[in-house]
């Protein structure tokens, strides 16, 4: 027995919906391609364009730019001043161990960031800068005794900074500034330094006291010599002129006559 023929009718509305979906996908894809063709670089950045992963030597400045979607990609490199903190162990000339904390600032040479990315990559600080810092610090600390470093830390800092400026590739780095933020020596050495400082302060205090005592003695001697000279001059004057005795008495008299006097004489009055 034969099966009855069944006629399947496709709803025209379903065809329209399918076409709309297809057109919607195509429009979205076109919009994606369009917007993927444009990119912006900020003023604090530089761009490096890569085609199928291969970086170009060209450095792209800030502004709006175009690229080939899905074929080219853009790598943005921050070119603001870099600041990194670190810590290294070093030995001084007299073999004292020290743990040194530091800060380094530098700028990238903007025109060469593409070469830096191609030759070194994003981790340029750890791959290039840190090893040079370690080497410069070990060399500079080895040129000074520990007490010299304590007394003149800036001399060590300057030597390290100059060494870094000479060693780091000027094609990549510029405006290098190095600061030592803390030096932690061995506990026994730091105790000895503190004791030395206390001893120096006590010695200075004792010296100041000695100078003060000597100055007081000097002033006392000068005063005594002045008093003796005044007495000598006065004695010579009395010896050469006895009437000065009466004159001195008159200068000290308060003008009152004594209540009782022997005889008719009035003191200090010579009628002859």
Image (cartoon, grey):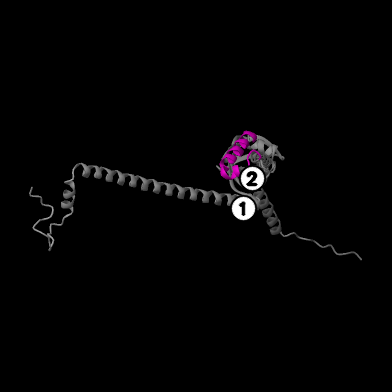
* Front residue (pair 4, 12): 12
Label 2: element kind: helix
263 vs 39, nearest the viewer: 263
Question: Which residue extends farthest bottom?
Answer: 1
Is 19 situated above or below 136?
A: below
The earlier-in-sequence mark between 2 and 1 is: 2
- Residue 155 within the magenta-colored segment of the rendering: yes
Residue extent of the magenta highlight: 142-170
* 15 falls in the magenta region: no
Mark whose residue sits in front, 2 or 1:
1
Q: Position of residue 186 (x, y in %)?
A: 66, 51
Q: Residues within 10 Å of mark 1 (few under 14, many from 20)?
A: few
- Numbered circle sitting on residue 191: 1
Farthest residue in the front direction?
Answer: 263
Q: Quadrant of the N terminus?
A: bottom right
Tell me residue 113's x, y (percent): 63, 37
- Residue 14 appears in the figure: yes
Residue 225 occupies quadrant? top left
**Whether label 2 touches label 1, CB < 8 Å:** no
Q: Is residue 29 above or below residue 171?
A: below
Q: Residue at x 60, y 38 (%)?
A: 161
At label 2, counting other C-alpha atoms closer than 10 Å, the crowd grade (few under 14, some 14-19, many 20 or more) is: some
| Residue at 40% from the left image edge and 48% from the top image edge | 217
Q: Position of residue 272 (x, y in %)?
A: 8, 47
Q: Is residue 84 visible?
A: no
Q: Main secondary structure of the magenta part?
A: helix
Percent from the top left, x then y, of residue 10?
A: 74, 59
Q: Residue at x 18, y 45 (%)?
A: 242
Q: CA distance from mark 2 to mark 1?
A: 65 Å
> Relative to 63, is 244 on the left or the right?
left
Residue named by callout 2: 36
């Amino acid at each position: 027995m034969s099966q009855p023929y069944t006629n399947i009718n496709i709803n025209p509305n379903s065809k329209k919906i399918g076409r709309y979906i297809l057109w919607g996908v195509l429009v979205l894809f076109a919009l994606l391609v369009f917007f993927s063709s444009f990119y912006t670089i900020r003023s604090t950045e530089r761009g490096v364009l890569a085609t199928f992963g291969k970086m170009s030597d060209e450095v792209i400045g800030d502004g709006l730019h175009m690229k080939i979607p899905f074929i080219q990609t853009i790598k943005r490199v921050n070119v603001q001043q870099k600041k990194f903190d670190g810590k290294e162990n070093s030995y001084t000339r007299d073999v004292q161990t020290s743990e040194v904390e530091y800060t380094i600032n530098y700028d990238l040479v903007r025109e060469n960031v593409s070469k830096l990315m191609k030759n070194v990559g994003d981790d340029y600080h750890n791959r290039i800068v840190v090893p040079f810092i370690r080497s410069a610090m070990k060399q500079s600390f080895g040129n000074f005794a520990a007490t010299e470093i304590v007394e003149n830390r800036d001399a060590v800092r300057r030597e390290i900074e100059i060494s870094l400026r000479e060693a780091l590739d000027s094609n990549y780095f510029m405006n290098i500034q190095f600061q030592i933020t803390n030096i932690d020596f061995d506990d026994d050495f730091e105790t000895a330094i503190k004791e030395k400082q206390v001893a120096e302060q006590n010695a200075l205090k004792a010296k100041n006291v000695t100078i003060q005592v000597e100055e007081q003695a000097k002033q006392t001697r000068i005063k005594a010599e002045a008093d003796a000279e005044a007495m000598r001059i006065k004695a010579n004057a009395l010896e050469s002129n006895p009437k000065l005795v009466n004159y001195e008495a008159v200068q000290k008299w308060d003008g009152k006559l004594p209540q009782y006097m022997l005889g008719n004489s009035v003191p200090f009055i010579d009628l002859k």
